[in-house]
Amino acid sequence: MVKKIMEPGFDPDRSAFFMPSGAGPCRFGQYNVFNRLVIKDLGLDNVPVFSPTQDENFYKHLKIAGKGFAMRSWRGIAAIGLLQKCLHETRPYEKEKSISDETYALHLQKAYNSMRGADGGIEAVLKNARVDFENIPTEKHKRPLSALSVRYSLDQTGSPTKTSQGK
């Protein structure tokens, strides 16, 4: 959020941030409060933080953001996830260093532009991204996968203990 505010051309009068809230004991419901404090410290009290609570009224509150906001947001999140998957599956094998990152950045910008448009034609962007990632020259060998599993628990004294297992 601060990074975005500090970008050249940031217009506080045409900006708002989205940080949902939650009910209950977790700290998720506090993030929007902290965001508002940071914005105030930056002297931008006029920049709103839209923070609907994730409860039975969540989707009713989202209607304030306009028709189709929830679906459009979901499509954007899913598109970014698919682009990241392409990046992470290609980059370890690329022959030309950073070509995957450049391809990702290009299509991320196209996805952003598409989602801002009236039609939200993200499908074409993703199809083109897939083709571009498939055409990146890669090494043919597979790299070993590694995993780390970490579990926290409380011992008999109530102190946290950590166990980990690597493969």
Image (cartoon, rainbow, N blue to C red):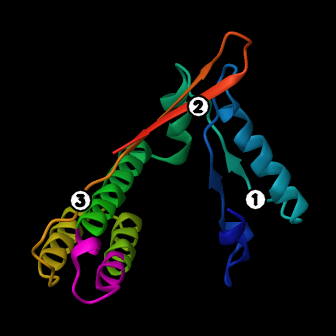
Disc 1 to disc 3, C-alpha distance = 47 Å
Q: Which residue is mark 1?
A: 47
Residue 101 among those drawn in magenta: yes
Q: Is 145 or 79 nearer to us in this picture?
A: 145
Q: Which residues are magenta?
A: 90-104
Amino acid bearing label 3: Pro
Residue 55 among those drawn in magenta: no
Q: Residue at x 27, y 58 (%)?
A: 82
Q: Quadrant of residue 27?
A: top right
Q: Is residue 8 above or below residue 69?
A: below
Q: On the rendered image, what quadrant is the N terminus found in?
A: bottom right
Q: Earlier in the sequence, mark 3 or mark 2?
A: 3
Q: Is 164 or 87 nearer to us in this picture?
A: 164
Q: Residues within 10 Å of mark 2 (few under 14, many from 20)?
A: few
Q: Spot the residue most to the top.
A: 156
Amino acid bearing label 2: Lys
Q: Is residue 11 left or right of residue 144?
A: right
Q: Residues within 10 Å of mark 1 (few under 14, many from 20)?
A: some
- Residue 7 at x, y percent in the picture: 67, 79
Q: Is residue 125 left or right of residue 75?
A: left
Q: Which residue is mark 2?
A: 162
Residue contact at pointers 2 and 1, CB within 8 angstroms: no
Q: Earlier in the sequence, mark 2 or mark 1?
A: 1
Q: On the rendered image, what quadrant is the C terminus found in?
A: top left
Q: Quadrant of residue 154?
A: top right
- At mark 1, the secondary structure is loop
Q: Is residue 64 left or right of residue 166?
A: right
- Residue 79 at x, y percent in the picture: 31, 58
Q: Earlier in the sequence, mark 1 or mark 3?
A: 1
Q: Which residue is mark 3?
A: 144
